[in-house]
Image: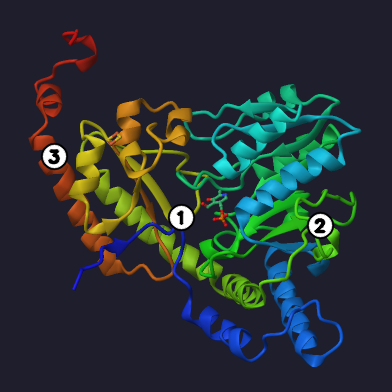
Amino acid sequence: MLKLPIYLDNNATTPLDPRVLDAMIPFFTEVYGNAASRNHPFGWAAEEAVDYAREQIAQLIHCDPKEIIFTSGATESDNLAIKGVFEMYAQKGNHVITATTEHKAVLDTCKHIEKLGGRVTYLPVNEQGLISLEELEAAMTPETILVTIMYGNNETGTIQPIQEIAKIAHKHGALFMTDGTQAVGKIPVDVIADGIDLMAFTAHKMYGPKGVGALYVRRKSPRVKVTAQMDGGGHERGMRSGTLNVPGIVGFGKACELARLEMAQDAERLSKLRDHLEKELLTLEESYVNGSVERRLPHVANISFKYVEGEGLMMGVKDLAVSSGSACTSASLEPSYVLKALGLSDDLAHSSLRFGLSRFTTDEQIEYAIGHVKEAVTKLREMSPLWEMHKEGIDLNSIEWAEH
Ligand SMILES: Cc1ncc(COP(=O)(O)O)c(C=O)c1O
Ligand code: FES
């Protein structure tokens, strides 16, 4: 039988918690009504389950259950928030501010509204992956309707100064939206304390099922509205039509409840495990942490190993399921645009690995990962002429390479 690698790609998706699956199962076979059916108990039972999940989710992020709009995932929530605000507030202005390190679900939606006549400012980040509050302030105009900056980055785990960003947006009369996909369920997120007006998040990054997400839309001071992007039966207070995915929503609710109860202890254990992994891997010379070490999600480490070629690195660590900043693991030909935005060279971006730990990651798995990565990096460097030159003290930047 095929031996599976150790799964350390939990920023891509997490396994479903068995307790979440248990909660979902009756809603496939027994309680199969349409939550919008008002005339019989099948519908009522489904609606009751959805309402309960809405409460579980609202409790995790400290909002009112009415402020949760169910979607198919964070991609849809990002689209609904940005396009929906752009259309709804067109009278006020057409300017949106975001950052270069956002997820494609945000960046490509911003590109779309540019085609519709919108103006978008893409703020740069510093080497820590953080935007500058001064640059944000300077970019605000009377036409700015929306500032959208993610909570925690999916590649590096860097956490933006959310409360400060919200204050600046509000001071200038704009709404503040955040893609909370990687942060919700991992660190405390309080939409009221943080000043968030809209927030996208998704179940499958927090031990829930794939294909179900939510958009938080503030209802009071200010009351925020988005134009629906999916027309139809007028579900979700008219903001997102379509029959609700009841089992998925039940699972999402359960995942949020578990996160509320277990997040603190998970975060403490995982940050210790992550720090141990990182400390060990940094004993390899010329290895670097990408993103902010101080402001970071507890379960993420992104490390570059200089003088190691990206493709070789991915082949060398095949006992681990991890992501890399190199293009050979993705459909695009460019190395990670997030790492490049932090100022990394193409080479260093190519030679990076992203480790994403989960509730189910064990000490033994991390010990194995440490040994495996150390061995791979050491072996690859032994074969690398660049490493040899570096060891001989030759400044590689001073070399003039022959043209071919
Ligand atoms: C920051 C961020 N936003 C959005 C998404 C998209 O989420 P979903 O897969 O639920 O559409 C992801 C997941 O890849 C993500 O990490
Ligand atoms: S190492 Fe494969 S694309 Fe860079």
Q: How far apart, in angstroms, are the residues tagged by discs 3 and 1?
A: 26 Å
**Kind of residue indicated by mark 3:** Leu
Q: Is residue 17 above or below residue 61?
A: below
Residue 386 occupies which quadrant of the picture? top left
**Where's the N terminus, which quadrant?**
bottom left
Q: Residues within 10 Å of mark 3 (few under 14, many from 20)?
A: some
Left or right: where does residue 10 sit relative to residue 104?
left
Query: Depth-wise, is mark 1 or mark 2 nearer the camera?
Result: 2
Residue at screen point 83% across, 90% down = 40
Is label 1 within 8 A of ligand 1 (CB to nearest ligand atom)?
yes
Quarter of the image holding residue 345? top left
- On residue 11, the disc is 1
Q: Which residue is mark 2?
A: 239
Label 1 close to label 2 by CB (< 8 Å): no
State left or right for residue 125 relative to residue 340.
right
Query: Any mark on residue 380, and which?
Result: 3
Relative image position of residue 117 (x, y in whole percent): 76, 26
Q: Is residue 222 above or below residue 1?
A: above
What is the total number of numbered labels drawn onto the structure image? 3
SS label for mark 2 = loop
Earlier-in-chain disc, 1 versus 2:
1
Q: Give the amino acid at mark 1.
A: Asn
